[in-house]
Amino acid sequence: MSEPKKVGRRTFLNYAIAVVATGVIVGVATYFAVPKGEVTVTKTVTTTIAGTPTTPTISPTTPPTTSPPAGKTYVEFWTELVEEPRMEVLNRAADAFMKENPDIYVKVVPIAEDDYPSKLTAAYMSGKMPQVMEIPTYFAPEWLTELDADAITDVINEIGEDQFVYPLKIWQIPGQKKWYAASWIPWIAQVYYRRDWFEEAGLETPKDVITWDQMLNAAKKLNKPPDRYGILFMNTKDMGGNQTYFMVGYANGVRLLDEDLNIRFDDPESIETLQYLQELARYTPPGPDDSKALFTLYPVLPGTIAIDIANTYMAFRIYNTAKDLIPKNEICSRIKNKVEGMFGEDYALGIFKTNSTPAQIEASKKWCKFLLTSKYYAELCGLVVFGLFPVIKSITFSNEYLNNPIVQAFGGRKTVESLIEGFKTMQVPAYAEGRGIVREFGPPWTKCLIGQAVYEVCNEGAPPKETAVKYAEKMREAIKEMKK
Amino acid sequence: MAESMSFSGNYKTTKLYGYLFIIPCILSILFLIAYPYPFTIYLSLFSNMLRPGIIPRFVGLNNYIKLIYDSEFQKALFSSFIYVLTTSIGALIVGLFTALLFNRITIGKRILRGLILLPYVTPLVSTAYVWKYIFHPVTGIMNYLLVQLNIIEAPVNWVMDPRYAFTMVIIYDIWRYFPFSYLMILAALQSIDKTLYEAAEVDGAGLFQRFIHITIPGIWWIMATVFLIRCLWNLNKFDDIYLLTSGVVQTVPVYAYRTAFRAYEYSMGASILLFMAALSFIFLFIYLKKVLKW
């Protein structure tokens, strides 16, 4: 048997030094090869915050794979439209934009909405904030100080404020002709109901506006468990419950914060809303229902739900899964009790000044204007009709958008106009009258204190008044804590 | 003997080479710990950290004190304790009996052993969603069967209703992870010398006596190690619980996630995680000393 080959100490050390040196060289080369400002994004899975499509979708790997060419102004655009067809349109839009503006390089980065807080905080801490981002109102309060209101105001002024289909009140800085962000792809809550069943049961069939009484009576009358339930709405103790409170409550005049930024969760309007939700919950499927149930039962299993309090994403779901349901279905974009109102979410384009150079701000303005006015906007919104609603008149009323088969199937221009009326009454809880979007909104919403109250009254039979008082106090404490 | 060593030189030199070889590993571990841990500790001593437009404030140990008095955290901690204990023991027992059974099966054992591993190797998202659909109150087959068989009067929301969700999460975890225990225990079972059983049988030992005096001592260390690993995993388990119940069941990791990434209370989130890390270390220390006798 041969003896194992001996390796001398010197030989071994030589090899070790060679390996370490190679590692260092490769590391240094990689460091300089990767452009600054590059954010590596891995595959992400989107669930839902806003009650948007329910199927988890794997996002494409972050395009493009090439580095921005030297001498070009770099603009990074974060979008929550991670689904492949939507990313494909956005990437084509970026290519077309770069062709028109050869001195700008735009990188579209898909970020699942659930990952917004962690990803943006990481970017903020590492000094690698994106230049442009799709930003919903519920997420904005935390980041208002980083948004460049002057830049986006220029974009809005260039397009023309009157070119937007609804007044840009939500994002406006109070007392000024300035905005934090420009509306881009909003959605609004809607009530979908089975008109055929309403007619069979001899119930009124409201159009555009449905009242609290109409909803409750119909839910009561059409509830035949376990085969059919009267109504379905989100009553989980998370964002679902948060949203439902406002979906129904705005019709009763609820507001989370008043002009003086006091919590109003325990005022009579709020208590009545919780009472009403408790009553409605008697006619829902068992246990807490989340957004998945909302977007599955009504369109995928027609026959199980009579009324569904969902949002504009539903039309797209119905078209794709149950076209036969369209003629039997009716949509109301507003609910009425003491007043008329509807909850929505305004996903807007915001420009971050945090880590941007003046050249990047200028390039970002051009990119935002391009996004809002190019043909790609109509194409993008056509992918999820009504879920991504185009807010620029020339796009909303363009032939390309109005002739979309889904828009046509749901009534074409007439429905679009009715929806715009809904958007005009759209309210968001982050907005306080006279104050605009406020930071005080954050703790009650992010801690889901509203959702927990909804959950308790709907699922545990908690008394509405005591629950409202209990959670209003918790909200006040949370805000106090934030301000410390 | 020096001739039998791969490297020339004496024992001291060999030891030096040993250290040299593990330097990359030590460096990478240090790199992964050196920054995150001190930073997390630093984070936990402030309030309003990592928040734009807000100046962080040094609060010392206030976050920890608040945590101890936080009723929601107390509930989450209790849930975590029950969850870790029941799932770790449950998966171990089911894994043990499955391994014992499959150790004896001779026909089609390869296929059957493979099938047993299915819950463990199927992606988590798929199994969680399948369970959600099976137990759905309107569309789920389980509710349908239970109602048809008159076991329950009306459908129940098994995975979302807090009255049942916690039990469902425990059952799901045992179902999903018992194959891991099974795999480890089966490997240990196969390493037990068969002659020990033959000798015991000759001496008149029954099935139960052979199990207690030969099988259990033969697999004891594997079982103890598997239990330890599962406890540590489950103490930090987030994805299974969150995917299955959408946050209805709130264990400490779910609570920490909500606190840090939903409510932007990163400092409080850091305090929770450090508290859990300390708890894990204490458990690990006692377990290693008392059970594994290290």
Image (cartoon, grey):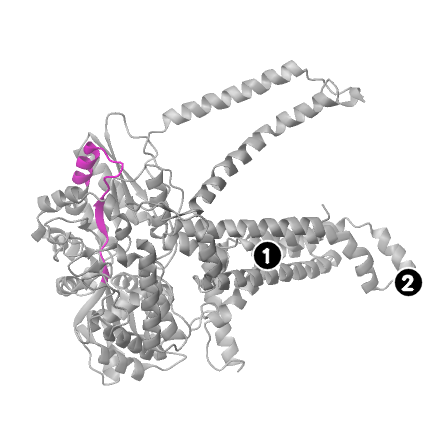
- Spot occupied by residue A481 in the image (x, y as percentages of width and height): 34, 56
- Spot occupied by residue A407 in the image (x, y as percentages of width and height): 19, 60
Image quadrant holding the N terminus of chain A, namely: top right
Res A399 → quadrant: bottom left
Q: Amino acid at mark 2?
A: Gly
Q: Which mark is residue B204?
A: 2
State whether residue A276 is above or below residue B190: below
Magenta-span inclusion, residue A397: no
Q: Is residue A4 found left or right of B147 in the rendered image?
A: right
Q: Is residue A153 found left or right of B116 in the rendered image?
A: left
State whether residue A108 is above or below residue B194: above
- Whole-angstrom CA distance, mark 1 to mark 2, is 37 Å
User: Residue at position x 52%, y 77% from top?
Assistant: B146
Q: Which residue is mark 1?
A: B177
Res B117 → quadrant: bottom right
- Spot occupied by residue A259 in the image (x, y as percentages of width and height): 18, 62
User: Residue at position x 46%, y 66% from top?
Assistant: B133
One can see residue A50 in this view: no
Res B176 → quadrant: bottom right
Residues shaded magenta: A344-367
